[in-house]
Amino acid sequence: MTKLDFAPKPKLDLVFERIVDVPPELVWKAWTEPEHLKKWFCPRPWQTVDAEIDLRPGGIFRTVMRSPEGEEYPSVGCYLEVVANRKLVWTDALGPNFRPSGAPNHCTESYFTAILLLEPHEGGTKYTAIALHPDEEGRKRHEERGFQDGWGKALEQLVELAKTM
């Protein structure tokens, strides 16, 4: 089981937890294979129209989301930690090969680091997503732009997809 070695800070971090009825291996597959990620990653009617994943520390995690109005929002980051079927950590503060990033995320207007924890739980998965922010303003903007609702809808879409894989 993979755990955090620190406690999230409520003034800086957002935490999303759910129990889902699909195994960690399918949740992992949905998160780590671009053809699956594009089907669920952002809440409908938004779409993920492109994704690139190099699943290793320093590897790229890139997505392009499209709004219902047709506007595209690219996001490029890099993986910091990869523990198969248990933990993904990535940030948009760094690009591939740990190069400092040029522009902050459009959702928060500042950089953030994401931690995804997957734990086996009674026929399913305990799913925990944590967004670490550098300051209270970035956390607040991310929350106001729908962190809980957006991650919740995306997770529902992930589960729906995972049940067909």
Image: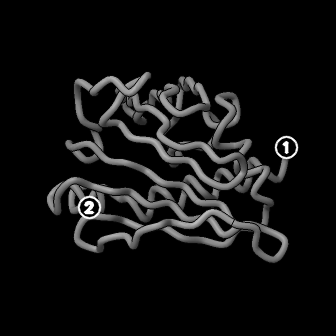
Q: Which corner quadrant holds the N terminus?
A: bottom right
> Which residue is label 2 attached to?
144
Across and down, in percent, residue 50 comes to 54, 23
Quadrant for residue 143, please give it: bottom left
Callout 1 touching callout 2 (CB < 8 Å): no
Q: Residue at x 57, y 67 (%)?
A: 3
User: 47 and 105: which one is in front?
Assistant: 105
Can I make out residue 68 in this image? yes
Q: Quadrant of the C terminus?
A: top right
Find the residue positioned furthest to the bottom: 122
Q: Is residue 158 left or right of residue 78?
A: right
Say which mark, if any, is on residue 165: 1
Q: Is residue 36 above or below residue 158?
A: above
Q: Secondary structure at mark 1?
A: loop
Horizontal and vertical percent for residue 16? Answer: 48, 67
User: In the visual, does 162 lie left or right of 97?
Assistant: right
Residue 102, position as x, y percentages in the image: 23, 24
Q: Residue at x 23, y 28 (%)?
A: 103
Please name the amino acid that badge 2 sits on: Glu
Name, please, the residue furthest toward the front: 5
Residue 90 in the image: state x and y as whole percent.
45, 42
Asked whether, in this view, residue 46 is left or right of residue 92, the answer is right
Amino acid under label 1?
Met
Q: Earlier in the sequence, mark 1 or mark 2?
A: 2
